[in-house]
Image (cartoon, coloured by chain):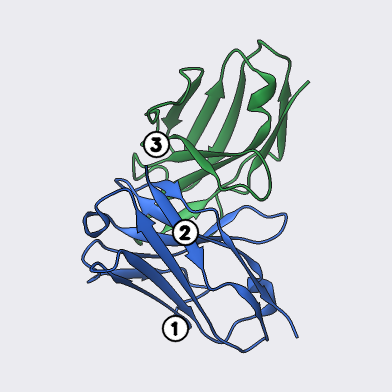
Amino acid sequence: EVQLLESGGGLVQPGGSQRLSCEASGFTFRSYAMGWVRQAPGEGPEWVSSISDSGDKTFYADSVKGRFTISRDNSKNTLSLLMNNLRAEETAVYYCAKYGERYLDYWGQGILVTVSS
Amino acid sequence: QSALTQPASVSGSPGQSITISCTGTSSDIEDYNSVSWYQQQYPDKAPKLVIHNVNIRPSGISDRFSGSKSGNTASLTISGLRAEDEADYYCSSHTRRDTRVFGGGTKLTVL
């Protein structure tokens, strides 16, 4: 059974940084691209970033490019998202997700990041 | 990247069929057969994949769910509506820039 468990959320001040982690199990982690999706309260999901199976290719939404960094450690089955210079409007539940072939097939339960002073 | 366009709400009675549309552009839906649909039954619950690659159901998803695409518009059809189908539904597509884009969501009410 695929399991994705996010951690690292919480309250952060505007302009601050936060690092999210996602521990994966139940599948061969190194064989799949992974991504992050966020969902602000009352809104639809917004794709944030993705990383190839080997980690050599990364992609970002324009809204986070230059501030967020996605990475993975295939030896530890872990995905990370480093978020810098956070803005109030980025308050959201952040989901870790596994890719199938150009689609996200499994999502974690999500973790809340609140950007507020 | 602009969000895909979905109707805000649809409704139907038990046993009926409903269709939710999802309109994109030539840079996403029209260019790729990578439309997927997600069901979110509660705001705090993770979205669940119900259709991928336009019209493929993952294992365990009822055959009452079906998908299609024409040009830059994709559609999700749910036949034989049941109370448990009441949820928010989101479409998503791969894009030419190797990113993904989601729709704004459609609230399905089963009357």
Residue drawn 55% across the image and 45% down it: B47
- What chain is colored blue? A
For the residues labelled 2 and 3, the Cα–Cα distance comes to 23 Å
Q: Nearer the viewer, residue B15 or A61?
A: B15
Residue B52, label in figure: 3
Query: Chain B is shown in which shade?
Result: green
For the residues labelled 1 and 3, the Cα–Cα distance comes to 30 Å
Q: Which residue is mark 1?
A: A66
- Residue A84 can be seen, yes or no: yes
Residue A5, label in figure: 2
Q: Nearer the viewer, mark 2 or mark 3?
A: 2
Q: Position of residue B102 (x, y in %)?
A: 53, 51
Whether labels 1 and 3 share one chain: no
Number of labelled discs? 3
Q: Is residue B106 left or right of residue A96?
A: right
Vertically, is B56 above or below B91?
above
User: Disc 1 residue type?
Assistant: Gly
The picture quadrant where one finds residue A110 is bottom right
